Image (tube, rainbow, N blue to C red):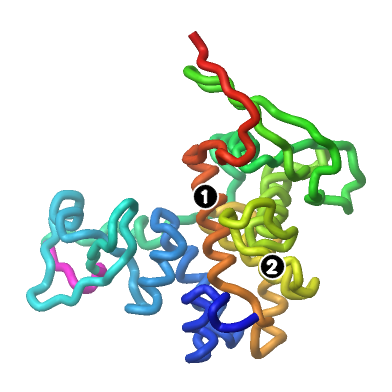
Amino acid sequence: MNNRSIPELDKLFSEIGTYRKSSELKELFNFIKRFPRIAPYNAMLLHIQKPGSQYVASASDWQKRFKRSINPGARPLVILRPFGPVAFVFELGDTYGRDPFPKKLLEPFGVEGEVPSRHFSNLKMKLKCDGISYTEVEHGTASAGFIQVSKLKKEEKISSSKKEIWVKTLYDIVVNRNHSDTTKFATLVHELGHLYCGHLGVPYEKWWEDRSQLDKNRREFEAESVCWLVCERLGIKNPSAEYLNGYLDNNEEIPNVSIDAVLKSVNMIEAMMDGNKVPRKEIITREFDIK
């Protein structure tokens, strides 16, 4: 792969060697985990600019929500803004106020819990928007699930209050019915990590990059990284933790993976969990207005 086809983020990391060491990647992922309300890319931008950041907000949010002001001469941090170029935020250490800052906001997670039903339900519902069929089947406890390119020419219906839309099924995800909802969720996220990191190729050129040429080691590292980040940012039991921590603790450097692909995958999955997903036009076969 030449430099022209490498996303700018991975090109930067490759040229300056950032996040290639296991310790650096672990620090980055733990940092991104601590900012569940901020998109993964923006959390990474914060880490590049100010690694020790504890909490960030815009100047107006600091004043309205926390009655805190910005220190004179404080330098803002730059993040990406939806539907716009950039936004500016300030870190807790660059603010002052009379009241102590709420400690619970510095520790967003307590004891590991179960996956919120709303997030799991939204995710399963929005899979169809990318042509993904979700099925639960009876498997032994050692079998979690898998994803594959669909071998059947079938369609699924997406209904809303205004429209009925039929879409093509491109992929099948199968998950073990006998597992807990949290394990089912983690399995689903892991398999989506494979898909959105391009390990199964790409059905349409602009959806994501075709990275099906990767070897199994790199594919698994990326999918486990996606699963780890999504689960950790929700504060739920994380089956990828053992794999990822074991690898990072026992290897000085990480495989030649794409952090860009991992963060984009996490972003797509979290958007679906929030219900922010519409059917891709390429897979719509027919649609009807509901009167």
Vertical side of 78 occupied by 68: above or below: above
* Residue at x-position 67% and y-position 62%: 198
Q: Which labelled disc corresponds to residue 211? A: 2
State left or right for residue 40 relative to residue 123: left
- Front in this rendered view, residue 184 or 157: 157
Q: Mark 2 belongs to which amino acid? A: Arg
State left or right for residue 55 relative to residue 184: left
User: Please, which residue is most extreme toward the left here?
Assistant: 72
Residue 15's spot in the image, x, y percent?
Answer: 50, 90
At numbered mark 2, what does the secondary structure look like: helix, strand or loop? Answer: loop
Q: Which labelled disc corresponds to residue 270? A: 1
* Residue at x-position 71% and y-position 85%: 250
**Total numbered circles:** 2
Residue 57's spot in the image, x, y percent?
Answer: 25, 60
Q: Are the residues at dot 2 and dot 1 in contact (C-beta closer than 8 Å)? A: no
Foreground tag (2 vs 1): 2
- Front in this rendered view, residue 147 or 156: 156
Vertical side of 277 occupied by 111: above or below: below
| Quadrant housing the N terminus | bottom right
Q: Which residues are magenta?
A: 91-97
Q: Mark 1 belongs to which amino acid? A: Glu
| Viewer can see residue 8 | yes
Residue 98's spot in the image, x, y percent?
Answer: 11, 61
At numbered mark 1, what does the secondary structure look like: helix, strand or loop? Answer: helix
